[in-house]
Image (cartoon, coloured by chain):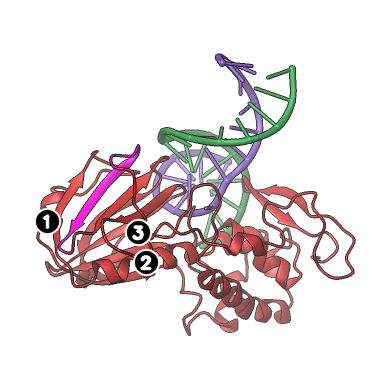
Chain colours: A red, B green, C purple
Amino acid sequence: MPELPEVETVRRGLAPVMTGQTITDAAVNRPDLRWPFPTRMAERLTGAQVTGLRRRSKYILADLSTGESLLIHLGMSGRILISGVMQGDFHHDHPASAKHDHVVLTMGNGARITFNDARRFGAMDLLETALGDAHPLLAKIGPEPFGNTFNETYLTRALGGRKTPIKTALLDQHVVAGLGNIYVCEALYRAGLHPARPANALPATAVAGLVPIIRDVLAEAIEAGGSSLRDYRQADGELGYFQHRFRTYGRENEPCTTPGCTATIERIVQSGRSSFFCPKCQR
DNA sequence: ATGGGGGCCTGCCGGC
DNA sequence: TGCCGGCAGGCCCCCA
């Protein structure tokens, strides 16, 4: 499910109900997700106060008063839902004991934080907060797209020498953090770049243009609460609505929406993933 | 070092 | 109604 905008939306939803609260109970309903949970995870979570919620790439990090941080990745189908507390004007409840509810945290304020993941490509781990990005899953991830180190100079170097298609390169988390299949397709459409263009053959102007385009598409998606396909929800149960602004993703055979363009969106497969693009607008 | 493909899982949808 | 293939927002790992 989740790319950077969806993960950031979930983080923002969790922050007000988790920050400053103590985890009074941790129900761990299976031994693993993609990998085994860390030893005694439930015990290490119970009684800990959540001092802050951060995001790095597509990971959520909950810093705990114990000196550890809970690392969460949603994989493809992971969801986090809040229940048991009033959320704004509405109370979104979550059916008790739903299928694939793998971890449920109960907070001191009564909130229940449920991690549900049908496909179990998600992950959870505990690491020493002081380790920072030294965790194996974080160590090799590229710069945050909204950070200063993600700029034209950096991107030129990162793409240089890479013959791989620009689509594949931008999907590579070592190049830039947080992009997934949807937002790469949308960014390349905005940039007017064909997804099969070799990454190392882009003109300097195209590379320079990608930096603000990537930031814009992600920022707009965050503002819209992410994109809701299939089962994605914000943590409060609300749907995101950026999917209504897709120009290419999932629009195979539909008309290109660029004013004056009469072409239809095409789909190709690159590195086993669908790429959607307009053959006239993207070269 | 780069890149391609397999594999991990479950669910859903369309076609027969 | 049922079965089957194809597809899905991610990413690690192995191989060339």
Choose the circle earlier in sequence order: 3 or 2.
2
Residue span colored magenta: A96-108
* Within-10-Å neighbours for mark 3: few <14, some 14–19, many 20+: some
Choose the circle earlier in sequence order: 3 or 1.
1
Left or right of residue A7, residue A206 in this image? right
Left or right of residue A2, residue A39 in this image? left
* Within-10-Å neighbours for mark 2: few <14, some 14–19, many 20+: many
- Residue A46's tag is 1
Frontmost residue, A125 versus A182: A182
Mark 2, residue position: A13
Q: Quadrant of residue A280?
A: bottom right
**Chain for disc number 1:** A
Position in image of residue A165 (x %, y %): 68, 59
Left or right of residue A43, residue A166 in this image? right
Q: Nearer the viewer, mark 1 or mark 2?
A: 2
- Residue A90's tag is none
Q: Nearer the viewer, mark 3 or mark 2?
A: 3
Q: Same chain for labels 3 and 1? Say yes or no.
A: yes
Position in image of residue A239 (x %, y %): 50, 58
From this viewpoint, which residue is outermost toward the front?
A: A89
Choose the circle earlier in sequence order: 1 or 2.
2
* Within-10-Å neighbours for mark 1: few <14, some 14–19, many 20+: some
